[in-house]
Every structure is written in structure tokens, then in C-alpha cells.
């Protein structure tokens, strides 16, 4: 699954908005250096890092900070947020608890647009480039293709044009979304409470296929990955599946091993990276499901893998509070944090941010 260029973190909420502290330090690793550390209050509920600024949400307030932690603007909401917030085309977009979709100006925090939504419940928002044929009543003034998908917790799905907030389509799947959606080539892959994996056309909401292996099929912790030909995922039992994206049929399944983590590098077209119950890291051939390589981790770094990325031809794994780097046929500890590392974002070819569980942002430089 392609990683977003901006960073979204969900943590516990409520804080007195606090001074961000910046420090500069060197890591103990010979291969990395801590360029900068930005400390934000640990109780922000949502944070995005976008265009070198932080956008933070606490109860009824959205605040924009520069990279030094100085407040740029703060917008106080009448109602609390009832969704994640996304940033697209200089707009901060979210659904509030009064079922109003709000668009704030990213630069000023002022309300640009709002729309009452006639669907109740919490929602998960995703943006994409609309390529469908549905016509809008009010003509658009720009060539923007950006649209918003609102996945409601009652199984309803809405698609709106971002520029005008006009509706392209809506569907009711009579089920409950239990995974975050993954979008590729204007197709939506999402897991349902019924155990079905659904593939939905993002341009019109049509259900292209649905699939499940057995009557009780647990997907609530599943993350979907795709190479545009197949869909790859772990079920609740730790079995690994590959489905044909076009037909919705099983390509292969690995059930002789159980896995605790699955990762896919966005530009990798040959293999998946998975972690077995014994913490070993394996490379799995996309086409056949065959294990190509297995690497045993040293006991000191046997941690659950949450992210994988490649930089400067090197493979990095984020494992709880550590970053591991591959060297030939093993992995070594590249960086260690006292807190859990909960997300990351690439800034340049040789720099990246990590985010820990206490809302500390650390910028690392590769060497």
C-alpha cells in the first residue's frame, strides 16, 4: 500500500496546546544522525505534518504550527470532529459531530465551505482523483479532479467533489466497514464485518466483487496491499492470501505458516515482506506465494514489524521502538527510541521523520 506523503496519527485526545520543543542531537548509530526533534503535547488526537507545518486537533480546536512550534492560526469548532481530517488542495476537510462537512483554508484556518450531510455516524475520509462520468449540477470552475469518499460506520459510502462539495454518488452496502480502505487505480478494497473483502469502483460506487474464504472470516485488523494485479492481506488467523484483482478469485494462500505482520514496498514488484510468529523476516514471491528468503532476527531486535520502506537501496523496518536496517543477510539496529514509533514520513531521499507515541517528531538523516 502506498504510504501517504503526509503523516496522520491518531492518539488519545485533549490537551492544553503546548509549546513545541526543538533539540538537536546525534544518534548513537554510526549510520544515522538526529537532525531535529520537535516535541508536541502528547495528548493531541490527530496530527498531520504537511508542507513543513503541523496541523493538530484537540477537543473542538484545530491549530496550525510552523516547524519551530509557533502557532500560525487556531480555529475553534462549534462541534467536535467526527472523522479523521485530510488535507487536499490547500483545504483541511473533516466531518463534525453535527454531520457537517467542513473545509478550512490551510493557510488561514478560516471556513471556506461547509455542507450538511444527511447520513449520521462517524466517518473515515479518503481523497482520490475522480475519473468517472457523473455530471455535476453546478459546473466546476477549475480542472481539479479531487474527490472525497466518506466511509460511514453504518456501511454507507458517499463520494463528493472536493471543489464544489456536490455529490457524485452514494451507496449503502448493508454491512459495516471494519478496515480502513485502500485505493488504487480508482478501485477501493475494504473489509466488511460480514467477513467479505469488497472491491468497489470509486468512480460510481458499483460493487465489482466480494470474496470470503469461509463463513467466519475475521478482517478487523487487516491491511490490504496491491500491485494493481492482485490484492494481498492477512486474515485474523495470520494466514496470507493473494486474490486476483480483476476476478476476485484466490491466487494462492499460505497456511502452513502464521504471520504477525505484512508489508509491501510501494515500488517493489517482485515480493512481499512478512514476519512469522517467531519474528523471522521472510520475502515472499508475489506471483507464486513461495518464500524466497528467510532472515532470523537477533534476540535483541525481535520486535513486531509495523512499517517497511526502502531508501538509498537499503531496506528499513520499523519494529516497535526501533528502526532496523538490512545488511546483506541480516538486520541490525539502526535507531532506537524509548517510546513506540507509530508512524513515519519521507521528506527527501536521505531524510525522514518518525513519530513516537508521545507526539515527538524526530528527523533522521541517512548516512
Image (cartoon, rainbow, N blue to C red):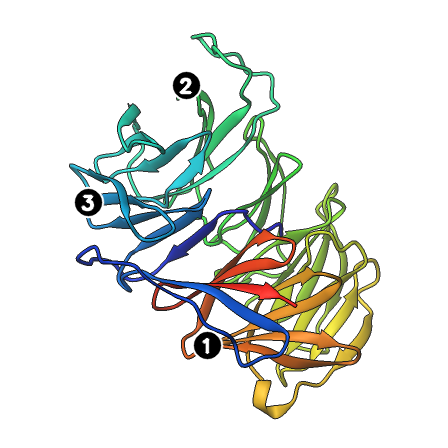
- In the picture of the structure, the residue carrying the numbered disc 3 is 60
- In the picture of the structure, the residue carrying the numbered disc 2 is 166
Does dot 1 land on a helix, a strand or a loop? Answer: loop
Q: Check disc 2: other Cα within 10 Å, few if <14, some if 14-19, many if 20+.
A: some
Q: Check disc 3: other Cα within 10 Å, few if <14, some if 14-19, many if 20+.
A: some
Location of the C terminus by quadrant is bottom right
Does dot 2 land on a helix, a strand or a loop? Answer: loop
Q: Residue 358 location in percent, x, y?
A: 34, 68
Q: Residue 349 location in percent, x, y?
A: 65, 54
Q: Is residue 150 visible?
A: no
Q: Check disc 1: other Cα within 10 Å, few if <14, some if 14-19, many if 20+.
A: some
Q: Depth check: 251 or 330 in front?
A: 330
> From this viewpoint, which residue is outermost toward the bottom?
299
Does dot 3 land on a helix, a strand or a loop? Answer: loop
Q: Depth check: 166 or 216 in front?
A: 166
Q: CA distance from mark 1 to mark 2?
A: 45 Å
- In the picture of the structure, the residue carrying the numbered disc 1 is 337
Amino acid at each position: 500500500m502506498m504510504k501517504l506523503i503526509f503523516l496522520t496519527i491518531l492518539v488519545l485526545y485533549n490537551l492544553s496546546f503546548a509549546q513545541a520543543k526543538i533539540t538537536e542531537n546525534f544518534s548513537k548509530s554510526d549510520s544515522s544522525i538526529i537532525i531535529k526533534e520537535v516535541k508536541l503535547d502528547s495528548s493531541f488526537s490527530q496530527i498531520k505534518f504537511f508542507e513543513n507545518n503541523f496541523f493538530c486537533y484537540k477537543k473542538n480546536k484545530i491549530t496550525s504550527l510552523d516547524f519551530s512550534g509557533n502557532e500560525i492560526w487556531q480555529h475553534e469548532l462549534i462541534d467536535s470532529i467526527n472523522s479523521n481530517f485530510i488535507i487536499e488542495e490547500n483545504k483541511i476537510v473533516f466531518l463534525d459531530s453535527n454531520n457537517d462537512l467542513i473545509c478550512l483554508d490551510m493557510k488561514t484556518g478560516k471556513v471556506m465551505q461547509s455542507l450538511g450531510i444527511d447520513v449520521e455516524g462517524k466517518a473515515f475520509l479518503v481523497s482520490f482523483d475522480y475519473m468517472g462520468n457523473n455530471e455535476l449540477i453546478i459546473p466546476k470552475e477549475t480542472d481539479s479532479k479531487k474527490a472525497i469518499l466518506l466511509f460511514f460506520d453504518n456501511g454507507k459510502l458517499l463520494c463528493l467533489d472536493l471543489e464544489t462539495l456536490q455529490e457524485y454518488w452514494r451507496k449503502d452496502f448493508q454491512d459495516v466497514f471494519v478496515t480502513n480502505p485502500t485505493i488504487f487505480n480508482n478501485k477501493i478494497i475494504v473489509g466488511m464485518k460480514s467477513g467479505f473483502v469488497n472491491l468497489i469502483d470509486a468512480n460510481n460506487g458499483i460493487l465489482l466483487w466480494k470474496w470470503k474464504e469461509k463463513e467466519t472470516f475475521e478482517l478487523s485488523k487487516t491491511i490490504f496491499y496491491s500491485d494493481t494485479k492482485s490484492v494481498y492481506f492477512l486474515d485474523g488467523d495470520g494466514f496470507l492470501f493473494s486474490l486476483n484483482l480483476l476476478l476476485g478469485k484466490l491466487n494462492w494462500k499460505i497456511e502452513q505458516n502464521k504471520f504477525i505482520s505484512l508489508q509491501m514496498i510501494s515500488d517493489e514488484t517482485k515480493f512481499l515482506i512478512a514476519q512469522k510468529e517467531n519474528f523471522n523476516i521472510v520475502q515472499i514471491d508475489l506471483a507464486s506465494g513461495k518464500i524466497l528468503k528467510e532472515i532470523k532476527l537477533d534476540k535483541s531486535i525481535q520486535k513486531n514489524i509495523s512499517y517497511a520502506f526502502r531508501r538509498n537501496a537499503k531496506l528499513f523496518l520499523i519494529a516497535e521502538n526501533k528502526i532496523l536496517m538490512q545488511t546483506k543477510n541480516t538486520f541490525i539496529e539502526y535507531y532506537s527510541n524509548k517510546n513506540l514509533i507509530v508512524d513515519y514520513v519521507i521528506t527527501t531521499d536521505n531524510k525522514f521523520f518518525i513519530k513516537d507515541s508521545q507526539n515527538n517528531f524526530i528527523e533522521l538523516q541517512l548516512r
